[in-house]
Image: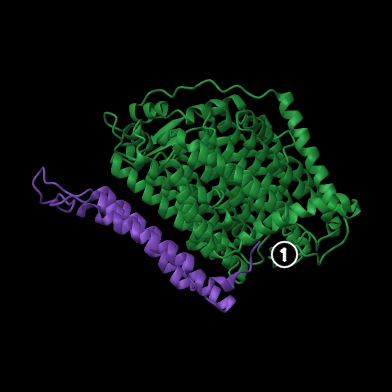
Amino acid sequence: MLGHLPYALAAWLILWGLYGIVTSRNLIHLVICLAVLQTSTYLILLAIGYKAGAVAPIYADMPAGTVAVDPVVQALMLTDIVVEATVVALLLAIAVQAHERGGSLDPARLCALKG
Amino acid sequence: MLAPWPVALPLVAAAFLAGLGDKLPRRLADAIAIGAAAITALCCALLLAGPPVVYWFGGIQPRSGTAIGIDFAIDANGAGLAVLSSLLILAALFFSLKYFDKPAHMFQVLLLVFLAGLCGFSLTGDLFDLFVFFEVMSAAAFGLCAYKSREVGPLQGAINFAVTNTAGAFITLSGIALLYSRTGALNLSHMHRMIAGHDDSLVLAAAALVCTGFLVKAAIVPFQFWLADAHAAAPTPACIVFSGAMVEAGLYAVARLQGALFGLPQLRTPLLAAGVATCLVGAVMCFAQRHLKRLLAFSTIAHAGVILCGIAVLEPGGLSGAGLYVVGHGLVKAALFLCAGMLLHRLQSIDELALHGRGREVPWVGVLFALGGLLLAGAPPTAMFFGDGAIHHALEAHPIARFAVTVASIATGAAVLRACGRIFLGLGPREPDAPGGGEQDEEPETEAAPIPWSMWVPAAFLLALAIGSAWLPREHAGSAAARMLDAHSWATQVLDRAQPAMPSPPPEEPLAKGLAHAALTVGLAIALALLTLFRKRLPEILRGPVRAVWNPLAGSLRALHTGAVGDQVAWLTLGVAALGASLVFS
């Protein structure tokens, strides 16, 4: 039962992240909601690789046959963090520009294009 | 040994230019960027000409059927997409030589990173690498879209583009994680062997999640809202790559994953339904625009729907048609975007109504534009014509989809021809202040000046290539498509090092039938364009009913395209829920 908790939490974070983006009235808030959506993927990845009682996957001083958690998902998560950092930095830079040019951080007031 | 170069070379050139670009003479920096793109195109063309290959990085081969390393699994479809991407990047680099008044080496850097991402995305055989290359390509594309960062339009377009695509990408990543939890592998063929025959609800839900990110990139209804905002606002040289290769890359990923990994017949109905909706929405919205780049952007949506219909039948005939269609459409659409860019450069406007008759100054652009419009409606000879015929043939059992595909060809061709008649021939009444909603005009990107050779040569070259693409070997495309859908044969080549088998190509549609169909769509497109231009001369009894249907239809669809990023993500959520439900409960 407790093993399913991370997945439930991830689903909850996905939904809150999406809800935040949909209702956001501030670009900085919107970008942070996107980051919240992203944290759900960290949880899913770590939960998949987790084993109760296992050690970190560093085998330097370990006797052969020690059970370790899955290192692949951790590598995936690191890549995921790099991706997030790139996109969030880029979006925040665009938000700063939008504030300078449009005078507002409200996405609803930034609508130059529609229809 | 050629396999890693299409990714490595543009990345190295981009890093070099990013570091030293402003210290080099402008001509040298331009030459490095163009040279890197040209050599990449050559490498991809050699990969396309050769047999399917599997390249393991670091030489780490699979042991007893278990993939340990990371591979590029290259077939004709992937290599073909990479060739198309590098040709379009090459055209974009040429076109941008005189397009920006200031030196634009950062623009070139972004284009080269974008190319590296696209090539890696087309060639990789690993699911997580597919995601990483997808993000490399996306990040570069967000930067390209926001390049004109001094105006509000491009910033809004870039925000909509980046937020919806990134949200889609995280949903894809969740799906990848779920599939990894089931299989413990990330190699497509290895995963296929673990899940083959186990299409339980976890696999189905994961398939829906994984496909979502790629369908967002492909601008499939209801994920299409970002595309027009991004394409209308991005600099013209970036638009041609967005429309010609990036959207198609999303569809390629869906076909590739269905073929090499999922093999789920349940995907047919939801994908076909989405394809039909995309054709129709794109066609109506395209015809309702007056901003030329936005018009072309919506036509890309309609054509993405056509390509998805070809893929969604999950048969080699439809898939090979979709492949040919991608090549022809990419080249024609890119040439049309370049024509719009030339108009913006020379006449400082791309509003169809404001430009009424002013295109007579640049008749050659008009010739290219009209030719592009005819080819877009399905006129031979292009690969698009043969692809259209093959898709129609494959949709024999789906009359609604055939109808939607035909509507897409007619409406998009008619919209381009209507704009052409109005701008270059001055047909129809002059109505610069007519209420025609949506985006109207765009800040020019350059000082008004005569069109330099670096602008019209790429456009003419792309149209010539589009016509030349009619002579692509269609049997080869057919057998490549059959192979792409054969996960078992892929798996034996990737994991057991078996020789690649070449299946026989699917039967083709008879040429006469295709020609008759093309004559119908092109004729109707021309007729529709003329009727719209001269509608004031028609009797009221004809105009009334058309207006009674068209105005509410276009008006309500337009009202949905609010341009607000929150609405777009709400549609995305609805779409992923619908896709997941239709798979899990099918």
Left or right position of B136 against B389: left
| Quarter of image, res B147 | bottom right
Give the color of chain B as drawn: green
Q: Position of residue A115 (x, y in %)?
A: 66, 61
Left or right position of B416 against B202: right
Give the color of chain A as drawn: purple
Q: Nearer the viewer, residue B41 or B255?
A: B255
Q: Which residue lies under the disc numbered 1?
A: B440
Q: Is A56 drawn above or below residue B448 in the view shown? A: above
Q: Is A13 drawn above or below residue B299 in the view shown? A: below
Q: Position of residue B447 (x, y in %)?
A: 73, 67
Local SS, label 1 = loop
The N terminus of chain B is located in which quarter?
A: top left
| Quarter of image, res B64 | top left
Residue B17 visible? The answer is no
Left or right position of B475 against B3: right
Number of other residues with Cα within 10 Å of mark 1, as a class: few under 14, some 14 to 19, many 20 or more = many
Q: Is B226 drawn above or below residue B371 in the view shown? A: below
Task: Write the residue at 81% across / 67% down.
Answer: B433
Left or right position of B167 against B338: left
Q: Nearer the viewer, residue B320 or B279?
A: B279
Q: Nearer the viewer, residue B179 or A98?
A: B179
**Which of the chains bears the disc numbered 1?**
B
Q: Nearer the viewer, residue B157 or B179?
A: B179
Please state which amino acid type lies under the numbered disc 1: Gln
| Quarter of image, res B450 | bottom right
Task: Write the residue at 74% across / 59% down.
Answer: B290
Q: Is B294 drawn above or below residue B182 in the view shown? A: below
Q: Position of residue A114 (x, y in %)?
A: 64, 63
For the rendered model, the colour scheme is: by chain
